[in-house]
Image (cartoon, rainbow, N blue to C red):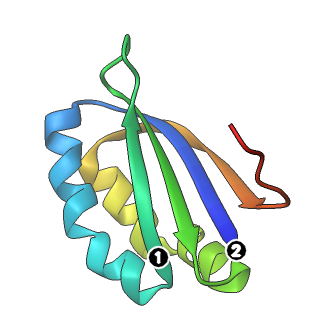
Amino acid sequence: MPYLLVRHDVKDYATWKPHFDKHAATRKRSGSKGAHLYRSSHKPNEVVMFFEWDNAKNMKAFAESDDLKKTMEKAGVVGMPDVFFLEEIERQPA
C-alpha cells in the first residue's frame, strides 16, 4: 500500500483547515483511502499529514496536480512542503 507523508507550514491553521476539509472529496476521487492529520505541539502552524492511497500512480498524480497547488496557495501554505512517497515494507509489534 502506498503512503504520502507531507509536512508544511501554514500562515494560520484556523484558515487552512477548512480548505483541507473541503478538498477531501477531491482526494477521495483521486484514490485517497484516508489520512491522519497532525499538528506540531510547539509550532501550531506546522502541519503533518499521512495519507494512505490506492496506488502509487494516482498518489503521484494527485501530489503533482495543479488543483492541489492552487488549493494550497488559497489555504495559506507557506514555502515548499516536504513530501515523501512511501511504501510499507514491514510492521513491527510494539
- Residue at the spot 23% in from the left edge and 34% down from the top edge: 13
- Judging by the rendered image, the residue that carries numbered circle 2 is 1
Task: Tell me the SS state at disc 1.
Answer: strand
- Up the image or down, 74 lies above or below 80; here it is below
- Residue 93 sits in quarter: top right
- Residue 28 sits in quarter: bottom left
- Up the image or down, 5 lies above or below 40; here it is below
Distance CA(mark 2)–CA(mark 1)? 10 Å
**Amino acid bearing label 2:** Met
Q: Residue furthest bottom?
A: 29
Quarter in which the C terminus is drawn: top right
Question: CB under 8 Å between callouts 2 and 1?
Answer: yes
- Residue at the spot 22% in from the left edge and 31% down from the top edge: 12
Image position of 76 (left or right of 18): right
Residue 22 horizontal/vertical position (percent): 19, 67
Residue 81 horizontal/vertical position (percent): 55, 42
- Judging by the rendered image, the residue that carries numbered circle 1 is 33
Q: Residue furthest front?
A: 93
Task: Tell me the SS state at disc 2.
Answer: loop
Residue 64 horizontal/vertical position (percent): 60, 70
- Residue at the spot 70% in from the left edge and 84% down from the top edge: 57
Q: Earlier in the sequence, mark 2 or mark 1?
A: 2
Comparing 34 with 6, the one in front is 34
- Residue 42 sits in quarter: top left
